Every structure is written in structure tokens, then in C-alpha cells.
Image: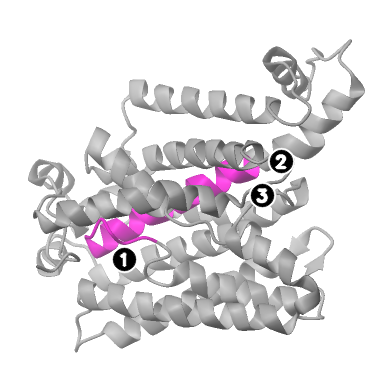
Amino acid sequence: MNILRRSQAFDPAVAGEALAPALPALPLARPPLGRLGLGLAALMAAAVLAAAVGPANIPLDATVRIVLSRLPGVDLADGLPQAWRDIIWEVRLPRVLLAGLVGATLALAGATYQGVFRNPLAEPYLIGVAPGAALAATAVLVSPVPYAFGGFSVLPLAAFAGGLTAVALAYFLARVGRTVPTTTLILAGIAISSIATSMTSFLMLLDIDRVFNLLAWVLGGFNLSSWDRLAWVAPYAVPAAAVLLLYGRTLNVLQLDDEQAQQLGVNVERTKLLLLGASSLATAAAVSVSGIIGFVGLIVPHAVRLVWGPDHRQLLPMSMLVGATFLILADLLAREVLQPSEVPVGIITSFCGVPFFLYLLRRAQRGVF
């Protein structure tokens, strides 16, 4: 049985609601306020907990006061040690925000890939985007040419070029006439991913003096987080995310056959290219600052779909919230599990993702998604 077959989780009622009149860039339908509020509350709780916990534990109320004191006209940090303020503002808060941004970006990209390919097993790492971005970013890191100038870094652009090149190669290899079979595309992506990973390892061996730092980066983590790194990724990830969110309703239409979607007014090929380009840019920006963190784009959208349904107008924003919460908590666990050392957060997400992936394969064998 083909375990990479098209998903059967699509709800026709959702499509029916999205069909009239389906044009690209349609308005986003907001999730119910209860879900959105629950997601935001969970995200804020995870962020405060991650900012408070560490080698120097800081009370939760003090953490909140320190963060709120940065707001104009608010001063709640009087009497708190200056060391606490520096730890929260200069070390932990940038790390928490970066982990949340990367988690939201990877989950959103994963949900988009699954929608475009109509396959719940599709995700940024499976079709070669992240390994290609990692290869290009590693090449920049081992290069003697500076890649950061003031507050601007070319690393996200290099990662984007690598990710887009990997997707283009996989797309070209999988193309049969005017169609691109989903199964063939995923298999081509796996092949491209293997090649990119091997070349990344080779580049690391060329710079033995920095191999430990490069290995830590490739395995994924946020131990080098800073406000500058947050400023690097935000200009790429935020606009890409905005574009993807605007296409939630159109993604519902794409769950139909391409011919049916075309008859309903959607330029299928152009829309797919736009969504793949925005997803690749968002993924590449995340990879450039965090390294390779797998399975977030696979397990988060699928979990959200199981709980709240397949409507992409709700699936995309909820995936962002859950993805940010998940990666913040995963990074917290990576910091705490082997103190004073850190475990690469990519290892933590793999421990969570591999059993989930096997569960999806088992469901696919039974013909249920």
C-alpha cells in the first residue's frame, strides 16, 4: 500500500464554504475567540515559564514585572536585582522570542506544504527545503567572507536561495509532463535532502577548528540567541507568514483536484508557486538562525488538524500559536535536562516527532488520516 497517498482528512463541508467565489488572497477567517484565546494564553504561559527558569531561577512574578517595565510609562521593577533584569532582558527573553518565532514559522510552513501537496506527511524537511537552506547557510558560515554588516545579515538570503534551489530541483525531478505527482515529489525531496545533508557534513569537515560549533548549529538550538538574530529573521519570516495567512481560504480550494480548483477561478500553478516560495522563505529564515530543527512542521499542523479540523483559515493561525508554544517548551527542556550542559533542541523535537511520524505511517497503512 502506498503510504504517501493523498490525505483523506479533507472535509467537503469546509470546501463548500470556501468555494464561493474562490480567488487568490482572500480574507482570513478568524478562529473562534475561545480557541484563539486559549492558544495565546498557553503561549504566554510557556514564554513566562521559559524566561523564569534557568540556572538562576527568577520568580514568575518578578519575570513578568521586568518584562512589563519595558513598556512606556510602566515601572514595576523597582527593588529587583539588576542581575535579574539583565538575565531576563539580555539573555532569556531574546531566546524565548526567537524560539517562539521559529516554532510558529516552521509550523505555518508545514501546514502550508501539507495543504499544497494535499498530504499530511509533507513538511519542510521532507521535501528538501530545510536541508538545502542548511547547506547554503553552512557554506556561508565556513566562508572567510563576513556575512553580517551592522544590523543586516545575508545568512537568511543565502539560506533562502539554498532552500528554494532544493525545492526547484525536487520539483523538476518529479515533474511528469505538466503534472507533479505528490508521491514522486516527496521521494525526490528525500533524495535532495540526503545529498544536501551529505554536502553539509563535508563542508563541516573542511573547517575542523569550528566543527563543534557548526555541529551544534546543524543539530539546532538557540544558545546563541540575541536581539540581533531576532532582527535578522523577522523581516523575512513576518511578511512570508502574512502572505500565507491570507491564502487560508484558497488552500481549502486546493484540496480539490487541480482541474476543479482551476474552474473555480484559482490559478493553481501560480498559487502553488507563490505558497511554496513564501513557505520556503519563512523556513529558510528560521533555519538561518536556529539550525535544523525537525518535525515541528509535521507534528504541530497534524495535531491542530486532529483537534480543530482541516479548515486552513483556522489551521494556519492555530498552528502558529501551537508551534511557538511547542518549541519554547522544547527549548526549555533542552536547557534543563542536562544542566549545566545543553541538549540541541533538534534532538528534543526528534524524540517527540519520530513516534508521531510512526503513528502517522500506521494510520496511513490503515487508510485513515
Dot 3 or dot 2, earlier in sequence: 2
Q: Is residue 238 visible?
A: no
Any mark on residue 257, and which?
Answer: none
Give the secondary structure at mark 2: helix
Q: CA distance from mark 1 to mark 2?
A: 35 Å
Q: Mark 1 touching mark 2, by CB under 8 A? A: no
Label 2 amino acid?
Pro
Farthest front residue? 338
Residue 112 part of the magenta segment: yes
Which label number is shown at residue 222?
Answer: 3
Secondary structure beneath disc 1?
A: helix
- Disc 1 or 3, which lies upstream in sequence? 3
Near mark 2 (Cα within 10 A), the count class, few <14, some 14-19 or many ≥20, is many
Q: CA distance from mark 3 to mark 2?
A: 9 Å
Determine the image quadrant of residue 254: bottom left
- Seen in the picture, residue 155 relative to 168 is either above or below; the reply is above
Q: Does the stretch in magenta take in 186?
A: no
Compared with 114, 18 (above or below) is above
- Three-letter amino acid code at disc 3? Phe
What is the x, y in percent for residue 230? 69, 49
Q: What type of secondary structure mainly makes up the magenta span?
A: helix
- What's under tag 1, amino acid-wise? Thr
| 327 lies left or right of 140 | left
| Picture quadrant where residue 6 is located | bottom left
Residue 163: % across, % down: 50, 73
Q: Would you name the residue on which mark 2 appears?
A: 94
- Residues in magenta? 97-123
Task: Classify 10 Å Cα crowding around label 1: few (below 14), some (14-19), many (20 and above).
Answer: some
Question: Pointer 1: what residue?
Answer: 271
Q: How many marks?
A: 3
